[in-house]
Image (spheres, rainbow, N blue to C red):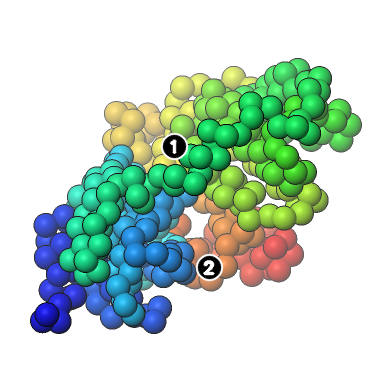
Amino acid sequence: MKELDINYICTQIGNLSGIPVRVFRGGESVFFHAITGLSADPARVWIDELTGISGRVGYLATEDFYYFGVVNSGEDTIVAGPTWQTERADRELRELAFRADVPKDAIPDFLAGMKSIVQMPLESVLQMMCVLNYVLNGEKLELQDILISEKEQSQFRSRPEKQPDEESAPHNTLSIEEKLMGFIRRGDVASLKAWMKSAPAVRGGTLALNELRQLKNTFIVTATLASRAAIQGGLDAEEALSLSDRFIKSCELLSSQRKLIDLRYHMLIEYTERVDSVRKGKNPTKLALAVSNYIRQHISETITVEDMAGALYLSRPYLSARFRQETGETLTDFILAEKTEEAKRLLRYSDKSVSAIGAYLGFSSLGHFSRTFKKYASLSPNEYRARYR
């Protein structure tokens, strides 16, 4: 049989599907094709997970719901993706560009390329991978061979409704949940911190058969409730849910009770602080909420008052005057203070360089970012990272 030209096959698959395709050999990229003109390959963010998939056909569904299909053939790993099912906001794509280390001047092309990728469900990607696997490996597979494990299904069917060591326990979670979620909805950071100093122990019932999994499952429930409470408090829904995804992913990586408790505390505080920032006081106006959410949705862009006014269907002078009248501060100060808060989070919880963070947040230069950060944080970015990381 004539040796197959894998690059040719991958090119045709990319042309037909409208999603990027690349080939890895020995963990290194040896071929990449995308009809959308991407200035960088977004798969680099997940390269370890993608090249670590075993078996002839597999997939990766990331925490952000980007889908990749994988076929292994000999020394080659063919990866198709990313694709997704729902529209992606510019903010999400800019965050992906940040994680993929896309240079600042290449970000517009990267965003345009990502937006041109054909959206499809995971099942469609896997059907394409089944065809590729048949061509390369001569093996016929169906969707359920990849997505459904008969071993797992048998275990589900044979598992008793109640585990032998599972005991009924009284629950006290409802009143505690109502108290916590009330703090988050109101953005009442001071009361939350005061209450948590003497908070009662939570008896949430048995959610797992070991202590670590019990803590993680409880954390996931708390994250879900906190995100909904924050949305009710005025936080943008996409921001609240994305934050929940990030915290749950961080939770799954931990293996110590102390760290899980610390992360839970940090999560509750962060949700409450974000709602407080959005609400701009106890009785925020619709305008203050709209301005706060606009800034958060465009945090990685150069935000101008004129653009914001256009998005809110207001004149620039009216928006500036009305916002200052309602909040006591100028729009420019508020925008830069919000960018500084996001910079603090990235300095503490990411490994990105100071210059990369400044570029991601839309500052024209490292000097501009450093001066702005020091004005609103009273420390330089490097000093802040050294002190609080």
Residue situated in front as seen by the camera: 14 or 275: 14
Q: Quadrant of residue 33?
A: bottom left
Identify the residue at the far right of this view.
198
Q: Residue drawn at (78%, 22%), measured in percent from left and top?
A: 168
Q: Where 242 sits versus 369, above or below? A: above
Say which element carries label 2: loop
Type of the residue with mark 1: Glu
Residue 337 at x, y = what percent? 56, 48
Q: Residue drawn at (27%, 54%), measured in percent from left and top?
A: 141
Q: Dot 1 surroundings within 10 Å: few (below 14), some, or many (20 or more)?
A: some
C-alpha separation, residue under disc 2 versus residue under disc 1:
23 Å
Q: Is residue 148 visible?
A: yes
Q: Quadrant of the N terminus?
A: bottom left
Q: Residue drawn at (21%, 62%), measured in percent from left and top?
A: 134
Whether the residues at callouts 2 and 1 have beta carbons within 8 Å, the answer is no
Mark 2 vs mark 1: which is more N-terminal? 1
Residue situated in front as seen by the camera: 27 or 317: 27
Residue 351 at x, y = what percent? 57, 67
Q: Is residue 302 left or right of residue 203?
A: left
Residue 346 at x, y = what percent? 57, 58
Q: Where 66 sits versus 79, above or below? A: above
Identify the residue under disc 1: 238
Say which element carries label 1: helix
Q: Quadrant of residue 382?
A: bottom right
Residue situated in front as seen by the camera: 145 or 96: 145
Identify the residue under disc 2: 352
Type of the residue with mark 2: Lys
Residue 268 at x, y = what percent? 68, 37
Q: Is residue 327 visible?
A: no
Q: Quadrant of residue 311?
A: top left
